[in-house]
Image (cartoon, grey):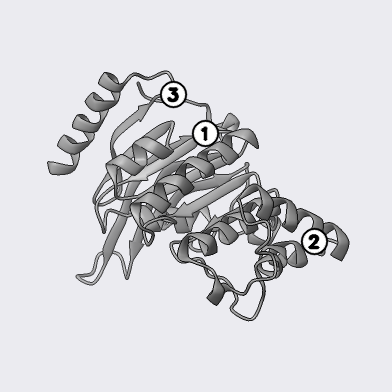
Amino acid sequence: MRDTVTPLAAAIHLEHVSKVFGKAGTDSAYRAVDGLDLDVRPGQMLALLGKTGCGKSTIFNMIAGLTEPSSGTVRVSGRDPFREFDSFRGKMAIVFQSDRLLPWRTAIQNVELGLEMLEVPAAERREKAQLWLTKLGLGGHENDYPHALSGGMRQRVSIARAFATNANILLCDEPFSALDESTAGRLRAEFVRLVKENGKTAVFITHSISEALEIGDRIVVLKRPAKIAYDVSFDADTGREERELIRSRIGGVLAE
């Protein structure tokens, strides 16, 4: 089942988007994305799945406003994220593969960072940071520095930092890939629960079929240069047999 949503109703809208690195028409030009159309509805958890080099990170960077398309239209909440980058402060948060915590700041000070940039009063930002650390199971570790925390705990701090700003859109670039599978599995489940409970829209980059099936309520499989090869939506009621059919179809697409 393919998910459809009108462009005006989409939280994220990409229309005929292409991205070429280097001078177009020359031997050095590299086409990372080719005529991509993609709409993500509000509240959706989208897993972008594909092999290394298929253009996932380029799409991620265009949605985040870190680079602009060579052609086509990118809109997030109706705005151009590259040309109106400053307008997205506090409205879009990123969780990276590495935790990117500041080593000289405690856990709670790291969570407060985004709130400081939004000029939230000190008492309010401390309260929000404490709330999200507690929700993510880090109560009692507020004053620990990153070097004293495990990898999973550091990534929990990173997730708390993203949620604390109350951003409507979360962009996640393989945030659990550096963790052992047991820790990653627990964090994935918690992350999905928090996204759903708080009504967030999330785009999650992965190269793992299993992770995509655990994370997403929609999976978009990309082939190089980034084009949609398979687009499927499902929900908590989707049975094991149907999920295995989806897994098999994705495996077939990636093997082509």
Residue 221 in view in this figure = yes
Q: CA distance from mark 1 to mark 3?
A: 11 Å
Please report contact status of discs 1 and 2: CB closer than 8 Å, yes or no. no
Foreground disc of the pair 1, 2 = 2
| Labels 1 and 2: the sequence-earlier one | 1
Q: Which residue lies under the disc numbered 3?
A: 235
| Residue pictured at 49% horizontal, 66% vertical | 150
Q: Which residue lies under the disc numbered 2?
A: 126
The type of residue carrying mark 1 is: Gln
| Labels 1 and 3: the sequence-earlier one | 1
Q: CA distance from mark 2 to mark 3?
A: 36 Å
Q: Quadrant of the N terminus?
A: top left
The type of residue carrying mark 2 is: Arg
Vertical comparison of 145 with 68: above or below: below
Specify whether 244 is left or right of 99.
left
Q: Quadrant of the C terminus?
A: top left
Q: Provide the secondary structure element on which disc 1 rests.
A: loop
Please report contact status of discs 2 and 3: CB closer than 8 Å, yes or no. no
Residue 44: mark in rendering:
1
Q: Provide the secondary structure element on which disc 2 rests.
A: helix
Nearest the viewer among 163 and 94 is 163
User: Residue 190 at x, y = what percent?
Assistant: 53, 43
User: Residue 245 at x, y = what percent?
Assistant: 22, 24
User: Residue 81 at x, y = what percent?
Assistant: 58, 54
| Labels 2 and 3: the sequence-earlier one | 2
Vertical comparison of 157 with 229: above or below: below
The type of residue carrying mark 3 is: Asp
Q: CA distance from mark 1 to mark 2?
A: 29 Å
